[in-house]
Image (cartoon, rainbow, N blue to C red):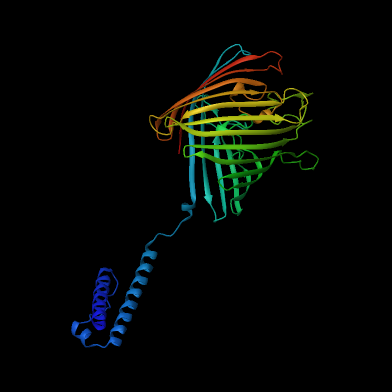
């Protein structure tokens, strides 16, 4: 019985090994057939030797096959480590500012393109270009000049070193790493690209960012100038209420010591207090925010609140807040989305040059409503409209000015 079982096993193994060898192109079928009579006359010990020999031959053929397959795979090239991305937006804009005699109409374009390269497992770098001027909070380029060529600027240039699990050191000119609930521009405009060094930790549930940024990093060839810096930190938590509802809560603190310094952007203080052409105080801004993402009747919905206070200010003009919601998401053809926000940002609540450049014309000492809607035209392409109904100047001008702005955008990204 034992011999019969071994005979059957050897016969099956021999047959399968020959079939395997025959199926392998360019692989020698060097497996000898074992006849039934040879098997029958062989001893148990001989049969065991046959089994071992056949098994070894199959292992050799499999090893050779793996080598051939590995050699057939294309070698990884430098291009495989690079990812491209970009976006283009065409905008028509109407501005009705009661401080101006006439309404303003203009057509603008924003174009951005960037690449990210994974240098090694722990190091990556990125470079991005954008249209526009040297305005730190806008990449828009107004069309005109007889169809003249438009300017392209360095939008980003950074190196990211992952030196520990979930922990990164990021240096250069980068996207703003501070989280803004529902992309609120209460503290930071979405186009701002801070310059300096950042330390970031994110494990998917808890994140933290600490930054050292420059307003001016050059003290001059004689070393007699001033290096102007800003510091900040933010911590946050991602949680889930149920399968359909998640939330984000966080807090930040940003220190911008500009008291006694001139404006860094176009000589304008954008609503911040000044004395004799200099900033009147520093900005030690504390922020708390919350965001809830859920679904209402199957439609994605986001609700948020953002609050800030400048703890350095002794005046009453030191707080700001924004609350609002978004319904839907226009990601593909036929999708629709709607949004609403109310904001009240007092004159010295934040550093005005870096806040939303559209709301109330940009800066602080502004309040009012923002309404938006969009429809998806195709994947990653949408047509949207945004309406700002704002007032500004209650503190700086002692008399509020009505400000209305309409933007119609055709935008796509890749």
Relative vertical location of residue 368 with respect to residue 55 in this rendering, above or below: above
Q: State whether residue 41 is above or below residue 115.
A: below
Q: Position of residue 133 (x, y in %)?
A: 59, 31
Q: Residue at x 66, y 33 (%)?
A: 287
x and y percentages locating residue 332 in the rendered image:
40, 33
Residue extending farthest to the front is: 1
Q: Quadrant of the C terminus?
A: top left
Q: Residue at x 75, y 33 (%)?
A: 258
Q: Quadrant of residue 255?
A: top right
Q: Is residue 188 visible?
A: yes
Q: Which of the pair 299/282 is nearer the observer? A: 299
Of residues 275 and 223, the one drawn nearer to the viewer in this rendering: 275
The correct choice, above or below, for 375 with respect to 51 in the image is above
Q: Give the residue at x 69% y 37%.
A: 253
From this view, report whether residue 239 is shown above or below residue 185.
Answer: below
Horizontal and vertical percent for residue 162?
59, 52
Is 219 on the left or on the right of 387, as rendered?
A: right
């Amino acid at each position: 019985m034992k011999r019969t079982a071994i005979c059957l096993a050897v016969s099956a193994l021999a047959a399968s090994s020959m079939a395997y060898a025959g199926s392998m192109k360019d692989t020698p079928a060097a497996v000898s057939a074992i006849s039934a009579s040879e098997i029958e006359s062989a001893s148990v010990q001989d049969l065991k030797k046959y089994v071992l020999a056949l098994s070894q031959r199959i292992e050799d053929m499999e090893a050779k096959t793996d080598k051939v397959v590995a050699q057939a795979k294309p070698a990884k090239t430098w291009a495989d480590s690079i990812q491209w991305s970009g976006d283009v937006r065409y905008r028509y804009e109407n501005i009705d500012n009661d401080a101006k005699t006439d309404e303003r109409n203009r057509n603008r374009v924003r174009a951005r393109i960037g690449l990210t390269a994974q240098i090694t497992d722990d190091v990556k770098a990125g470079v991005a270009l954008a249209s526009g001027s040297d305005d730190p909070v806008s990449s828009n380029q107004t069309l005109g000049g007889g169809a003249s060529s438009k300017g392209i600027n360095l939008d980003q240039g950074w190196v990211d070193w992952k030196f520990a699990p979930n922990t990164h050191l990021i240096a250069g000119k980068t996207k703003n790493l501070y989280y803004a609930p529902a992309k609120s521009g209460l503290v930071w405009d979405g186009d701002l690209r801070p310059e300096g060094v950042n330390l970031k930790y994110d494990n998917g549930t808890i994140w933290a960012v600490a930054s050292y940024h420059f307003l001016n990093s050059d003290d001059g060839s004689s070393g007699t100038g001033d290096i102007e810096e800003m510091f900040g930190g933010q911590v946050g938590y991602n949680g889930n209420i149920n399968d359909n509802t998640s939330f984000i809560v966080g807090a930040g603190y940003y220190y911008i010591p500009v008291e006694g310094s001139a404006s860094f952007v176009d000589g304008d203080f954008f609503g911040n207090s000044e004395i004799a052409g200099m900033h009147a105080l520093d900005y030690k801004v504390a922020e708390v925010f919350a965001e809830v993402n859920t679904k209402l009747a199957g439609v994605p919905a986001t609700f948020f609140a953002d609050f800030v206070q400048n703890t350095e200010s002794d005046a009453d003009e030191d707080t700001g807040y924004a609350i609002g919601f978004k319904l839907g998401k226009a990601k593909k053809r036929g999708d629709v989305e709607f949004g609403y926000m109310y904001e009240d940002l007092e004159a010295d609540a934040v550093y005005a040059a870096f806040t939303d450049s559209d709301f109330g014309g940009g800066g602080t000492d502004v309040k009012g409503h923002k309404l938006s809607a969009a429809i998806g035209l195709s994947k990653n392409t949408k047509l949207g409209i945004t309406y700002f109904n704002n007032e500004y100047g209650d503190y700086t001008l002692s008399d509020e000015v009505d400000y209305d702005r309409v933007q119609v955008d055709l935008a796509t990204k890749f």
